[in-house]
Amino acid sequence: MADSRTHSLYHRRSDWEGSLPRGSAGRYPRPPAPTSADHALRDLVALSRALFDTPDEGEILRLAMDHIAAAGPYRAEAGYLKVGGDLVPSQRNGQTHASAVGRRVGELAGQDGPVAVPGRPWGRALGLRGLEGLHGYLVVTSRSRPTEAERSLLATLVRHTAAALSVAFAHRRQREDALELHRLRDQRAALQRQLISVVAELGYQRAVHALMADVAASSGGEEAITRALHGLTGLPALVEDRFGRLRSWTGPSRPDPYPEPDPVRQDEMLHAVARQAGPVRIKDRLITLIRPHGEILGVLALVDARDEADEHTVLALEHAATSLAPELTHLRNLAEVELRLHRELVDDLLAGTDEASAYARSEAVGHDLHRSHYVVVVQWPNRSADDSFAQTVGRAASAVGMRSLLTRRSDHVVLVADDRPHARALYEALARETGTRSGTIGVSAPCDSLDDIPHRYQEAQRALEVRRHSREHYGTTFFDELGLYRILGPGTDYRELETFVQEWLGQLIDYDSRHHATMVETLSRYFDCGGNYDETADSLAIHRSTLRYRLQRIRDISGNDLANVEDRLNLQVATRVWKIVLGGPG
């Protein structure tokens, strides 16, 4: 039997040499020509060394399968390695009985057991085990039943193969562990850098948030917020209202004067910014909107001509906008309350109310009703008289120095102003605010009593209507400059006629009463006679020179020039009303 095994090893020597890895002549010893059982044992020792010198598990299994004959009359039918819980067949496995052998190995569930292969009387599936458990299987068959010595040599080869696999698996795990450790160290370093960055970023965010919260709590208003934002970014910071008018600026290069906004471009800009999330760059400005509940209350911006803004600049701008929103909301609420109080007071004044209540309420809103007042009616055909337009009128009135109370009607806004408005200032301011000049303003005569306000309101409406139906539809018209138009038109009443006569003939009537004269009668006869001196003198039974003297005195007393067409017309109408409607003297 020994001679037969020796003969087998001798004839399989070339196979062994061919199975060694390339370039391994110095690593894997050639098996010597067997002459005895001792030689076979030495061959197994040499194979064992080769197995332990091989780092690859698949190569270890291949060497064991290729040199199984060193242990006896054996043939390696199949080999399996355990990978991830599964037994993976070796590429050296044959295909003839592969499925049956593989099924049988699976049935053994990690135990050794017999394997039946046609034409091979003896067959075993031998587990390759280490301290960590099963590494794989070696399926061996023999053409005859092995002796005890051959079984012992086979068991030794299996143990050495399993031990070599254990070492290889251990080395692989060490390499994998080393790689994993290196990866984890890199990952930890990256996480540490990220953590440092996040901590720094959070620190900056907390600092910005705390600063803006302190500024908001200090009630410093818009100026305090723009100062803080300028300090954080180094860039000029500004606040505009939604119409583009400057409210606050901190930093260098403030335009002086600040440019008047273009309503159309302002609306386009607001819509462009509103469509984006976060601050938006427009030309040299980084802009964000203040709109806490969807409605735009204002604009916060940084002037960044050099495009230096980074993520910290954007963060500071966003925090500043968040802090500014409650401030503008508070101001808006105060304005709405004030506007409502103004409106209720003006509504009552226009309808007629008791003086004590009106004076007390006017003091509460900071307006002095004891002064002489004018009622102003404003109508802009392209703007509905809603709250927005009412606020626009109030803002324009404040801009031109008018102290007033305000309310609105269905198609116009009403102001009760404590001084006579300038002939063009309010109209020009509203034309700029609205972007169009197609508006009309009517102003009443002065009102010295609260009881007169309802009547003065009618005068302002009359002035507005006369203006709208005149050749120049747009502009400002004062009631006390209407002349004859004050009594021509719908709504004229007896009191209006008396007022008109008193305005044009009042001084002459008073003079006649004090001096028992007939200046008004003389003027009436003069007009009745078409301005003819002789006819007028004859009708009055006075001399021509006396008539000339009286007409001169009429000029001096009334301050009106009979040569002026407008004065002459108004005086003639007034004398007719005095004589026919009011009954003449008395």
Image (spheres, grey):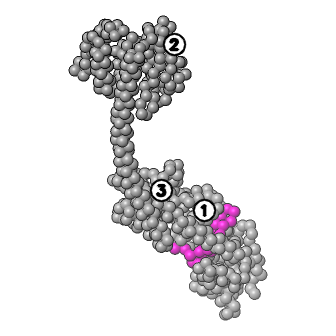
User: Which residue in the protein does label 1 denote?
Assistant: 389
Q: Which residue is mark 2?
A: 116
Instruction: Mark 3: give few (<14), some (14-19) or many (20+) Cα within 10 Å.
Output: many
Q: Earlier in the sequence, mark 1 or mark 3?
A: 3
Disc 2 versus disc 3: nearer the observer: 2
| Residue type for callout 2 | Ala
Q: Which residue is mark 3?
A: 288
Q: Nearer the viewer, residue 89 or 561?
A: 89
Cα distance in 3D space between marks 1 and 3 = 25 Å
Q: Amino acid at mark 3?
A: Thr
Front residue (pair 43, 394)? 43
Percent position (x, y) of residue 172? Answer: 36, 32
Q: Amino acid at mark 1?
A: Phe
Secondary structure, mark 2, is loop
- State the image coordinates of residue 337 (x, y, percent, origin top left): 62, 71
Residue at image position (42%, 33%) is 131
Kindly identify the residue that appears in the image at 60 percent across and 62 percent down.
Answer: 389
Q: Nearer the viewer, residue 83 or 389?
A: 83
**How many numbered discs?**
3
Is 416 a magenta residue?
Answer: yes
Task: Name the residue at 36% across, 16% down.
Answer: 71
| Earlier-in-chain disc, 2 versus 3 | 2
In the image, is 487 to the left or to the right of 270?
A: right
Any part of residue 319 in sight:
yes
**Magenta stretch bounds:** 401-419
